[in-house]
Image (spheres, grey):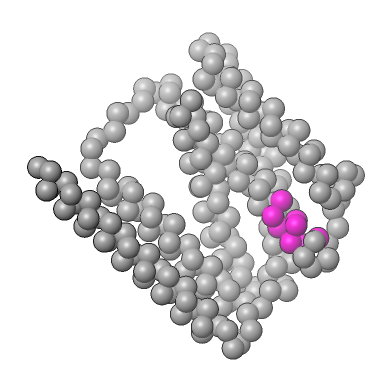
């Protein structure tokens, strides 16, 4: 059960990183460039953490067999689609509830429109898990491929809708001049403190490791 959850989380993180980079590009190109720069600097914290965890893994990993690798990859696509869906939900909330400049096109209205998407993503997530990890026949794997393509198609629609909603943020969000430099300095300080903390933690772990040896 842990490996499917890990694959799902990895897919969600990949989608989140892609969305964040697209948001930064949209802000710098068509919105408040200061916000885009600050968003980019905020991204450095999780990016440095991921890099640290990658470099820290010195022991070789046991590679799964070919079928298991493809099953994990397919299931991670469910996480990607879920990330796109969450992006759509958060940006819709901003566009409708915060700014009041948008309306919900779903006949169910807002926020009941979330249930319509959940009625799709919930069952497909369960069916995908069953097809990939509970059934070993070849036809279940190929059925999971078709289901994954369908899920990614729906997720792509959520990504487009979320990008349209985020455009409302691009058009309306502006940093006040008097707080730009203060906020920029705060984020840069947080990035440096985070990097130094990782270095200190790594040094502490190395001292403990060599001390035990």
**Residue at the image point whose x is 36% and y is 25% from the top:** 64
Residue furthest out toward the left: 213
**Residue 31 relative to residue 73: left or right:** right
**What percent of the width, then of the height, locates residue 24?**
56, 66
Q: Quadrant of residue 130?
A: top right
**What percent of the width, then of the height, locates residue 57?**
27, 43
Q: Is residue 200 above or below residue 140?
A: below
- Is residue 63 part of the magenta span, yes or no? no
Q: Is residue 39 visible?
A: yes
Q: Is residue 28 visible?
A: no
Residue furthest out toward the bottom: 178
Q: Is residue 50 above or below residue 23?
A: above
**Residue at the image point whose x is 28% and y is 49% from the top:** 55
Image quadrant in which the C terminus is located: top left
**Residue at the image point whose x is 40% and y is 68% from the top:** 191
**What percent of the width, then of the height, locates residue 127?**
64, 23
**Residue 29 relative to residue 42: left or right:** right
**What percent of the width, then of the height, locates residue 139?**
57, 13
61 or 210, which lies in front?
A: 210
In the rendered structure, which segment of residues is drawn in magenta?
Answer: 89-96
**Residue 15 relative to residue 156: left or right:** left
């Amino acid at each position: 059960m842990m490996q499917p959850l890990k694959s799902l989380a990895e897919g969600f993180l990949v989608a989140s990183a892609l969305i964040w980079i697209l948001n930064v590009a949209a802000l710098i190109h068509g919105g408040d460039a200061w916000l885009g720069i600050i968003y980019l600097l905020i991204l450095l914290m999780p990016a440095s953490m991921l890099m640290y965890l990658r470099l820290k893994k010195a022991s070789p990993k046991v590679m799964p067999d070919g079928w298991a690798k493809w099953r994990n990859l397919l299931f991670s696509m469910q996480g990607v689609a879920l990330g796109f869906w969450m992006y759509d939900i958060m940006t819709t909330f901003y566009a409708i509830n915060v700014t009041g400049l948008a309306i919900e096109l779903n006949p169910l209205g807002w926020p009941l429109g979330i249930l319509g998407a959940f009625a799709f993503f919930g069952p497909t997530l369960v069916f995908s898990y069953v097809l990939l990890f509970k059934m070993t026949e070849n036809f279940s794997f190929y059925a999971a491929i078709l289901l994954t393509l369908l899920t990614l198609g729906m997720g792509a629609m959520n990504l487009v809708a979320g990008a349209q909603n985020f455009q409302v943020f691009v058009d309306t969000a502006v940093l006040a001049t008097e707080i730009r430099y203060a906020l920029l300095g705060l984020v840069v300080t947080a990035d440096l403190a985070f990097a130094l903390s990782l270095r200190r933690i790594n040094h502490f772990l190395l001292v403990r490791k060599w001390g035990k040896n």
